[in-house]
Image: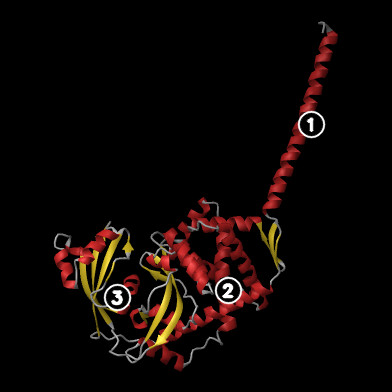
Amino acid sequence: MADGPGAHVEDKRYVIVTVRKMAVWLLAAWFVLAAAAATSAQSQFSPVIRVNDSAITAFELTQRTRLLTVLGATTGVEQIAREGLIEERLQQQAAAQQGISVAEEDVTLGLDEFAGRLGISADEFLGQLEQAGVQRASVEDFIRNGVLWREVLRSRFAARAQVSEDDVDRAIALTGSTGGARVLLSEIILPARTPQETAAAEARAAQFSEIQSFAAFAQTARDFSAAPSRADGGQIDWVELNALPPDLRAQLLALPPGGVTEPVQLQNAVAVFQLRDLQEVPPQRPDALAIDYAELRLPGGSRSEAQELAAQADTCDDLFGLARALSPDQLVREVLPIAQIPADIAAELAKLDRNEVSIDLVRDGTRLLLMMCGRTNEITEGLDRAEVRAQLRNQRIASYADGFLAELLADAVIVDLR
């Protein structure tokens, strides 16, 4: 183009047209981005599951999945989150029908209790979750529903879960020195060595408590249990009921065959047990109320090392000769009431006869060689009737709860909207 006044006019027109085109392009791009953001926000809070007349959003599902992941869940986390949210919607609907609500102070107390089980404060717990993208409101909703469901069960089943004096007498008779019983159990043992691992184990064990068949429990034991019995589907041999920890005895007495206990806290582990059979047996000798046992601690010890030592010991006295070169605190021999023996050790000792050995228990990398030295009746143990009554009542309410939730699920209209 030639230089001159006309050329300058053409240049200005070109610039003006170019600027207008850019403005139109930028405006269009802004609309596209705004629409995309609006669509993203809309999809985030769009229903993905409908439970009767209630909806579960994508946001809720994402938040619950993150929460379970932080607590240590690793397998099928989204499916577990989905099932949990569906059950919670049904529980909320049941609460609404009964006119039950939860005060905010109860939610705060529940949050403190949950965090306390992890050994941290509620603020520390919420801070850790916030770093993982879990909002406080999502955690409070989770806690609130747990408290709400507990109130629903208390309102609905408290009267039906009353325990008679005969029930208490039978429980005490089966665990006391005037009678006897033995149980055939299957076990699932989950490691719980850190706060996060403990929370995950408790959550998973609570789900396992709902198992209703022998086959399902056996398969779950093979898939998840950390105990050597996993190879046999969690099955262990007959155990004297009186040799088990008191809280576990009370649970087992309230179960039918095939029933599963609530999660049981062990040392560095959480367990659930399935009752396969219970037999009342006439006592042929006074039931042992205390156990004489030896505990040889082998830090970093392998199973083969423990087996080698066990093969050299015919009695508990032999262990002292074998432990001469070890630190004095590695070998301990005690006579304790069964109720005072750590639950995981008591469970192992319950499987043993005199001078028999267990090498299956490992704590924080230390393998324990346990030897049964003998049982004694020299220490008496009283059973609190009120405690026995409360344990039986709680077990009955838990049984009613499982049936009630199954009914709610059977009657519900659940639609996956994705």
Q: In the picture, residue 341 is in which quadrant?
A: bottom left
User: What SS does tag 3 mark?
Assistant: loop
Can you give x and y, in whole percent of width and height, for residue 346 in the image?
32, 74
Can you give x and y, in whole percent of width and height, for residue 386 in the image?
42, 86
Disc 2 to disc 1, C-alpha distance = 57 Å
In the rendered structure, find residue 149 and report the number of the disc placed on it. Answer: 2
Q: Which residue is drawn at the image coordinates 36% and 88% (left, top)?
A: 180
> To which residue does mark 3 refer?
352
The label nearer to you, 2 versus 1, is 2
> To which residue does mark 1 refer?
24
Q: In the picture, residue 373 is in which quadrant?
A: bottom left
Disc 1 to disc 3, C-alpha distance = 84 Å
The label nearer to you, 2 versus 3, is 3
Q: Is residue 104 left or right of residue 387?
A: right
Q: Is residue 11 left or right of residue 215?
A: right
Q: Is residue 224 left or right of residue 301?
A: right
**Amino acid on which disc 1 is placed:** Val
Can you give x and y, in whole percent of width and height, for residue 176 in the image?
34, 88
**Amino acid on which disc 2 is placed:** Trp
Q: Residues within 10 Å of mark 3 (few under 14, many from 20)?
A: some
The label nearer to you, 1 versus 3, is 3
Q: Residues within 10 Å of mark 2 (few under 14, many from 20)?
A: many
Q: Which of the two discs, 1 and 3, labels the residue nearer the N terminus?
A: 1
Q: Is residue 405 above or below residue 165?
A: above
Q: Which residue is drawn at the image coordinates 84% and 14% (left, top)?
A: 9
Is residue 171 among what the camera can see? yes
**Amino acid on which disc 3 is placed:** Leu
User: What SS does tag 2 mark?
Assistant: helix
Can you give x and y, in whole percent of width and height, for residue 192 in the image?
40, 62
User: What SS does tag 1 mark?
Assistant: helix
In the rendered structure, find residue 173 and report the number of the disc placed on it. Answer: none
